[in-house]
Image (tube, rainbow, N blue to C red):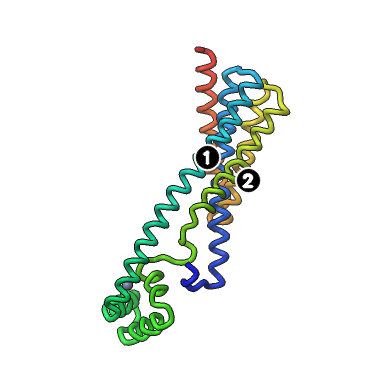
Amino acid sequence: MSRLRQLPERHFVNRIGWLRAAVLGANDGNLSTASLIVGVAAASATQNTVLIAGVAGLVAGAMSMAAGEYVSVSSQSDSEQADLARERKELSESPGFELDELAEIYVKRGVDRDLARQVARQLMAKDALGAHAHDELGISEITTARPVQAALTSAASFSVGAAMPLLMVFVLPVGALVGIVSAASLAFLAFLGAIGARAGGANVLRGTARVTFWGALAMAITAVIGKLVGTVV
Ligand SMILES: [Zn+2]
């Protein structure tokens, strides 16, 4: 999408988008692996069993994040490509109609009719497809999909989040895992929640409280179910 103009201030938005995706991946990795470890440890398993469950959880989660992200971003990319191809065809077949269409978009946004036509004409003289992609289709540099990058970013950030509770299984006795992994994970989730809220320009306290509450609930439910299953089996 190098033909679409890139404005310098976009890079900031772009970096924020990337950071939020990484924070979400780490959040998922941490919460799901910590819950898994807490659940299996609550079922009074051995160190080895907890470790196998944790490693399997990390690998399965990272793969599932990568595959899910790849598919979703690819399909977004496919539909963007199809839209651009249709637009390119329309521009070459009926440029007059396309000029009216673009001008009309600016009129709807409050620009005078004559000025709107002038703006549309000048934008189309420089980069007709870029102007239509941006203002008609809403496709810009930031939303341009990169499936492989998205898949790798999610898998990597998930693994980083999952590594913390997993490392604890190596160094702590099984009996201490439920308490310490839960507490450490909640602290980590709160930290990620604060970063995520800051990156998104949202209220830091509310973001942190939300992620910590849902994290605590998820781990508590898993621990209770682990305990029940551990007693029954
Ligand atoms: Zn158009």
Query: Would residue 1 be visible to someone looking at this image?
Result: yes
Neighbours of disc 2 within 10 Å: few (<14), some (14-19), many (20+): some
The residue under the point 53% across, 13% down is 231
Q: Nearer the viewer, mark 1 or mark 2?
A: 1
Res. 12 image quadrant? bottom right
Which residue is situated farthest in the right direction here?
Answer: 171
Going from the N terminus, do you reach mark 1 or mark 2 first? 1
Q: In the shown orientation, is residue 181 left or right of residue 139?
A: right
Helix, strand or loop for disc 1: helix
Instruction: Assign ligand 1 to one image quadrant.
Output: bottom left
The residue indicated by pointer 1 is 63
Neighbours of disc 1 within 10 Å: few (<14), some (14-19), many (20+): some
Query: Would residue 178 be visible to someone looking at this image?
Result: no
Image coords of residue 36 (percent x, y): 56, 29
Name the disc covering residue 191, or none: 2
The correct choice, above or below, for 3 with respect to 44 in the image is: below
Helix, strand or loop for disc 2: helix
Please name the amino acid that badge 1 sits on: Met
The residue under the point 54% across, 62% down is 14
Depth order, front residue of 112/213: 112
How far, Cα to Cα, is label 1 from label 2?
Answer: 25 Å
Please name the amino acid that badge 2 sits on: Phe
